[in-house]
Image (tube, helix red, strand yellow):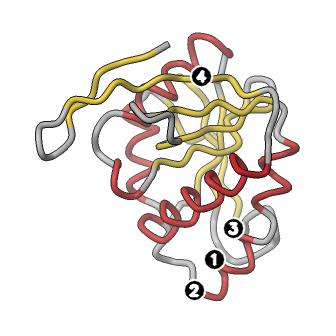
């Protein structure tokens, strides 16, 4: 599945969605780097040390998530990815320099239409992501005062309404 996107400079790119079966180390390394750039651009509530600590767990999460979907550019380089467990969106990250070009919308639409995504969790302190998911039709159904690691970062559970 592909689409056309324009960058700020007006260059048109063909983006392609791939459901990843094999997860070689090179791909894991590319996705970890993409994840880190995305988190540093969007998760401003996390300290540099916290991002570094979380980063240590990202390769394992990428290997273990049941469904990994990657969006690549003209050169086959990953520019966004999402991970799914059944109908739950576990992760969605866009390369920092590609934010705002519709890549998240394309990936999430694919997840909803092709994989039945109907629920997710999001950090309350990431208003851009919260607004994006609300725009895509998700509604907050629950709030936890801590994240999955027990840290004081509120997490919102959302369902497709």
Question: Reading the chain from its start, which is encountered first: label 4 or label 2?
Answer: 2
How far is the residue under mark 4 from the one under mark 3? 27 Å
Give the structural element (helix, strand or loop) at label 4.
Answer: helix
Question: Reading the chain from its start, which is encountered first: label 2 or label 3?
Answer: 2
Give the structural element (helix, strand or loop) at label 3.
Answer: loop
- Residue denoted by label 4: 111
Q: What is the residue that sits farthest to the front in this orientation?
A: 75
Q: Which residue is depicted at the point 57% across and 66% down? A: 36
- Residue denoted by label 2: 48
Question: Where residue 145 sits in the image (x, y, percent)?
Answer: 69, 67
**Any mark on residue 51, and which?**
1
Question: Where residue 70 sits in the image (x, y, percent)?
Answer: 59, 33
How far is the residue under mark 2 from the one under mark 3? 22 Å
Quick one: label 3, few (<14), some, or many (20+) residues within 10 Å?
few
How far is the residue under mark 4 from the one under mark 2? 31 Å
Q: Which residue is depicted at the point 43% across and 16% down? A: 2
Left or right of residue 72, residue 58 in this image: right
Is the residue under label 4 in contact with that under label 1 (CB below 8 Å)?
A: no
Is the residue under label 1 in contact with that under label 2 (CB below 8 Å)?
A: yes
How far is the residue under mark 2 from the one under mark 1? 5 Å
Give the structural element (helix, strand or loop) at label 1.
Answer: helix
Name the one closer to the observer, 57 or 79: 79
Question: Where residue 95 sits in the image (x, y, percent)?
Answer: 45, 52
Position of residue 39 relative to residue 161, above or below, is below
Left or right of residue 123, residue 72 in this image: left
How far is the residue under mark 1 from the one under mark 3? 19 Å
Question: Where residue 64 sits in the image (x, y, percent)?
Answer: 88, 43
Position of residue 26 relative to residue 2, above or below, is below
- Residue denoted by label 3: 145
**Of marks 4 and 3, the one in the foreground:** 4
């Amino acid at each position: 599945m592909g689409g056309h996107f324009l960058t700020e400079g007006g260059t048109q790119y063909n983006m392609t969605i791939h459901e990843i079966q094999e997860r070689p180390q090179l791909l894991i390394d590319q996705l970890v780097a993409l994840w880190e750039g995305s988190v540093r651009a969007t998760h401003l509530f996390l300290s540099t040390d916290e991002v570094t600590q979380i980063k240590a767990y990202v390769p394992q999460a990428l290997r273990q998530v049941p469904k990994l979907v990657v969006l690549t550019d003209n050169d086959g380089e990953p520019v966004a990815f999402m991970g799914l467990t059944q109908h739950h969106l576990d992760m969605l990250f866009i390369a920092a320099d590609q934010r705002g070009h519709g890549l998240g919308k394309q990936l999430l639409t694919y997840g909803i239409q092709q994989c039945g995504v109907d629920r997710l969790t999001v950090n309350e302190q990431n208003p851009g992501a919260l607004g994006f998911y609300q725009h895509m039709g998700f509604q907050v159904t629950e709030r936890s005062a801590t994240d999955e690691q027990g840290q004081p970062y509120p997490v919102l559970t959302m369902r497709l309404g």
